[in-house]
Image (spheres, helix red, strand yellow):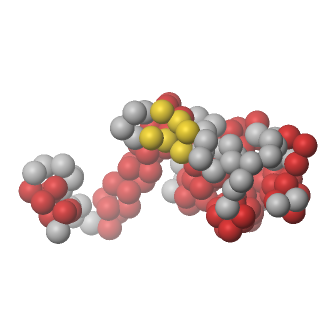
Amino acid sequence: MLAAAAAVAGALPPMPDSLAEAANAVREEGRSTWAAYYKHARGFDSLRPLSHRGVNDWGSVGMMAIDCLDTLWLMNLTAEFKQARSIVEEIDYTPAGREARSVSTFEMTIRGLGGLLSAHALSGDRLFLRKAEQLGEALNTA
């Protein structure tokens, strides 16, 4: 219902004529969303879209970058995937590198570990496996 109202108001692009056009439109939205995060909140867990500010609300692990890794890979957004990889590479996930804080172990497991392990499975890049091991060790102390 809201989508229909937004389309009438001109807020949504017109429906594509083919699946290829639809796939390209989705890919471009993915690129645009990543670009906004990278510009305004690079390295933070989340982007606050109205204030254009980053916030660490998931344990300061770069959760948005982790969440995007598999999607960027599957969309073949190589430059953006490399940007996300560089964010993950810079974060120290070891228990010694983490300040004590309360985090949802469930969310950190499915989003943090799951995102890193899926990025490793898709790309074969061992950095993601090493970072998953570090994050797992940090969670083991929870």
Task: Judge left or right: residue 7 versus residue 72.
Answer: left
Q: Residue at x 68, y 43 (%)?
A: 60
Residue 2 in picture, x, y percent from top left: 19, 63
The total number of labels drawn is: 0
Q: Residue at x 36, y 38 (%)?
A: 50
Residue 95 in picture, x, y percent from top left: 88, 48
- The quarter of the displayed image where residue 80 is located: top right
Out of 46 and 129, give the one closest to the viewer: 46
Task: Judge left or right: residue 86 versus residue 10.
Answer: right
- The quarter of the displayed image where residue 103 is located: bottom right
Placement of 91 over or under 130, stated as above or below: above
Residue at the left extreme, as displayed = 8
Residue 137 in picture, x, y percent from top left: 88, 58
Out of 103 and 46, give the one closest to the viewer: 103
In the rendered image, the quadrant that contains the C terminus is bottom right
Q: Residue at x 76, y 40 (%)?
A: 91
Residue 110 in picture, x, y percent from top left: 67, 67
Let me know if residue 129 appears in the view: no
Let me know if residue 88 appears in the view: yes
In the rendered image, the quadrant that contains the N terminus is bottom left
Q: Residue at x 16, y 55 (%)?
A: 6
Out of 20 and 56, give the one closest to the viewer: 56
